[in-house]
Amino acid sequence: MLLSSRLVGLALLTAVISNAQSAPKSPLAPFLSVTDPVVALTHVELIDGTGSAPQSDQTVVIDHGQIAALGPSATTPPPVGARVLNLSGHTVYPGLVGMHEHLFYTEPEDRQLGGLVAGELVDTAPRLYLAAGVTTGRTTGSIAPYTDLNIKKEIDAGLRPGPDLDVTGPYLEGEPPLIPQMHALTGPQEARQMVDYWVGQGVTSWKAYMHITPAELKAAIDEAHKHGQKLTGHLCTVGFTEAANMGIDNLEHGIAVDSEFFPGRKEGECPDGLRGEMAKDLDISSPAVMSMIHTLVEKHVAVTSTLAVFESMAPGHPPMSFLLREQSSMPAEVFASVMTIRGQIGDHASRSPMGTLLRKEMQFEREFVSAGGLLMSGCDPTAYGAVLAGFGDERNLELLVDAGFTPQEAIHIATENGAKFLGRDKRIGTVAIGKQADLVVVKGDVAKDISAVYNVETVFKNGVGYDSQKLIDSVHGMVGYR
Ligand SMILES: [Zn+2]
């Protein structure tokens, strides 16, 4: 007995000593693939985020987190001592600036238990966003603001992988709150108090929700602006034109949720079930819609495209190939719930207005951009759960191309436009010398085939390369749990 306990004691002591001798391992280490301070990505196809045409056979040099050199591979030699990655057959574009990146997800639906409810995804959401190339994300409405703020702190401290976050405050919602995690405001005074309190806690942006009253919305916008912060909305009680005139900065989802075009809607109401009429009657080239678009452009109100989540409510969407790509990230019962609801939507295909509305939303987004509007892109992993964090950002790029944008315009919408809105376009959003090295490396030619954006291999955030597949593998079967 004595001998064995001595041995155990010795073993423990040895363990303590060897721990003390080896440097503590970074929690990021399992996901990193490129950690050299100077890296040259050679022979890449470059889509620089400005919307201009792709350039072939380029070299991008990363030096201590910054883009240090950029140009044709023939005339841009890698610096001496650089790690050289020959990436012919790959495309490089800026890290995505996701503008609707919730850190939560819709729980599987169960009619016996009740309606819609969301669950916070502390671990899986940040990893999946980063895996898809999202290096900056606005959370656009929080159900657990302290949790979101702590996640941001840990990402900033290098304790967990994830995008740089712009944490949005708790939803500014009116009565009745859409889900039980939202607070219903009791008036403009409380809207101001809520903004003040959460700005003090570290929140940096705002989102108003469907049932907020006009007076509460106005108070919240003014209070956010007082703190130098911006406010977006997924509105319903208030229409787009009215919100733009109040000074709102951004509108989520697009015309498909603009209640001023719900036929028969009464002023100040959030009606249910007018979608069918809207799909039939809405004419995007009508003077009424054009006038709304011009008001948004004139008042500098940005729009966030969330085509992926919108598509998921249309019969026959999203494509099965997309869902199969997501499947391994979900527990079996979550995937089963998604498939059941997708099937039910398909069963009522002949009566569903959502396919028509999706096409009209796409047309609206094109018109908004041609009128000079700032269109951004976001994931919004909500509805019934068919769109997961990150995967939805990739699908949105594909759908923007479906909507009629070129691949480089789609990338521009998902990168530089978001950076401009956030006021960070001097640091991020395009691939240019002196900018932060936030870069996505994908296999394939994105300009020829946008679906290559699903083949993310490496995501550089601040010059450090993450292995996309390792991030995805690490959340295996966990989306919906944590
Ligand atoms: Zn949302």
Image (tube, grey):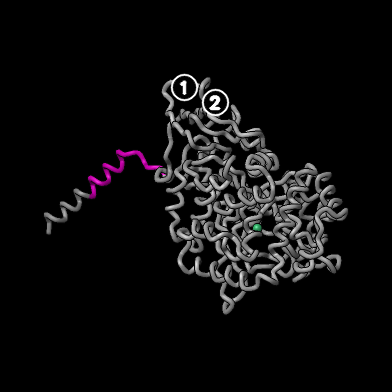
Circles 1 and 2: CB atoms closer than 8 Å: yes
Classify mark 1: helix, strand or loop: loop
Residue 251 magenta: no
Image: 417 above or below 388: above
| Residue picked out by circle 1 | 79
| Badge 2 amino acid | Ala
Residue 434 placement, left or right of 205: left
| Badge 1 amino acid | Pro
| Residue labelled 2 has its Cβ within 8 Å of some atom of ligand 1 | no
| Residue picked out by circle 2 | 68
Residue 161 placement, left or right of 316: left
Q: Where does the N terminus fall, quadrant-wise?
A: bottom left
What secondary structure predominates along the stretch shown in magenta? helix
Residue 17 magenta: yes
Read off the magenta span.
Answer: 12-26
Q: Quadrant of residue 418?
A: top right
Residue drawn at point x = 57 percent, y = 44 percent: 449
Badge 1 density bin: few <14, some 14–19, many ≥20, Cα 10 Å = some
Where's residue 301, x and y in %? 77, 47
Residue drawn at point x = 56 percent, y = 45 percent: 134
Residue 24 placement, left or right of 133: left
Query: How many marks do you count on the picture?
Result: 2
Q: Mark 1 to mark 2: distance in Å? A: 10 Å
Residue drawn at point x = 58 percent, y = 41 percent: 448
Image: 283 above or below 247: below
Badge 2 density bin: few <14, some 14–19, many ≥20, Cα 10 Å = many
Residue 472 placement, left or right of 179: left
